[in-house]
Image (tube, rainbow, N blue to C red):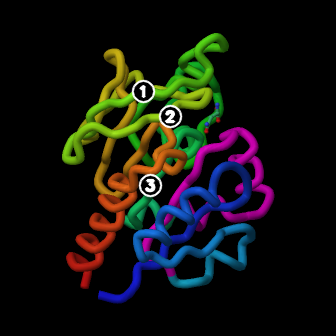
Amino acid sequence: MNKKRVAVLAVQGAFVEHEKMLESLGAECIELRQKSDLSQDYDALVLPGGESTVQGKLLKELDMFDTLKSQIEEGMPVLATCAGLILLAEHLCNDKRTYFATLPITVRRNAYGRQLGSFYTEGNLKGIGKVPMTFIRAPYIELVKGNVEVLGKVDGNIIAVRYHNQIALSFHPELDSDARIHQAFLDMISNSVERVG
Ligand code: GLN
């Protein structure tokens, strides 16, 4: 099939690293910086890490929020990392705000506290195996509902899920050199395009 075109939300945060990784795997990336960028054709979406409150505010101010929410609800494949996971969550247990709320999970922001703000470990992801995991002021998932599939846990806490077209991770796979998660995401795009087409 044609080269996959992935739109990476680029209003704030660690988006360049996702682009580098996806491009190294043969995908084409475009950056979503303003509303007019949303009228381009793309097959999938990446919501990067960063600061969810800032990203959420900018998405509203730039009038990008509603279009992106509809695209996710209509089944566009999404890979969300860290702040991106927070944007997708239906509930936050320690914050009144919610954003897209398309993923039926409850998330705890900054779940590892100040002392363990950032750390590295390795853990198993369903369907992939052991992967490097870099956590930076990360959230974890307290509760999943319905058909949400748990893909991984670290120290008993859920740090990776999939729900239909949405993959959400507490950690930052784009910051390590292992590209298998991004490859799995590209494979998921192929499958969803094949199903639709
Ligand atoms: N702590 C950030 C937030 O609450 C997320 C951190 C990250 O994306 N690395 O949005």
Which amino acid type is marked by label 2?
Thr
Residue drawn at x 27%, y 39% is 125
| Residue that numbered label 2 is attached to | 134
Q: Is residue 177 left or right of residue 9?
A: left
The magenta region covers: 42-69
| 50 inside magenta stretch | yes
Residue drawn at x 22%, y 79% is 194
Which amino acid type is marked by label 1?
Thr
Residue drawn at x 23%, y 71% is 191
Instruction: Find the distance from the CA under tag 2 to the CA under tag 3.
Output: 16 Å
Q: Earlier in the sequence, mark 3 or mark 1?
A: 3
Residue 111, above or below 183: above
| Residue that numbered label 1 is attached to | 121
**Picture coordinates of residue 85, whole percent (x, y):** 50, 41
Instruction: Find the distance from the CA under tag 1 to the CA under tag 2.
Output: 7 Å
Is label 1 in a helix, a strand or a loop? Answer: strand
Q: Quadrant of residue 52?
A: top right
**Picture coordinates of residue 29, whole percent (x, y):** 55, 74
Q: Quadrant of residue 184?
A: bottom left
**Picture coordinates of residue 11, whole percent (x, y):** 73, 58
| Residue that numbered label 3 is attached to | 79
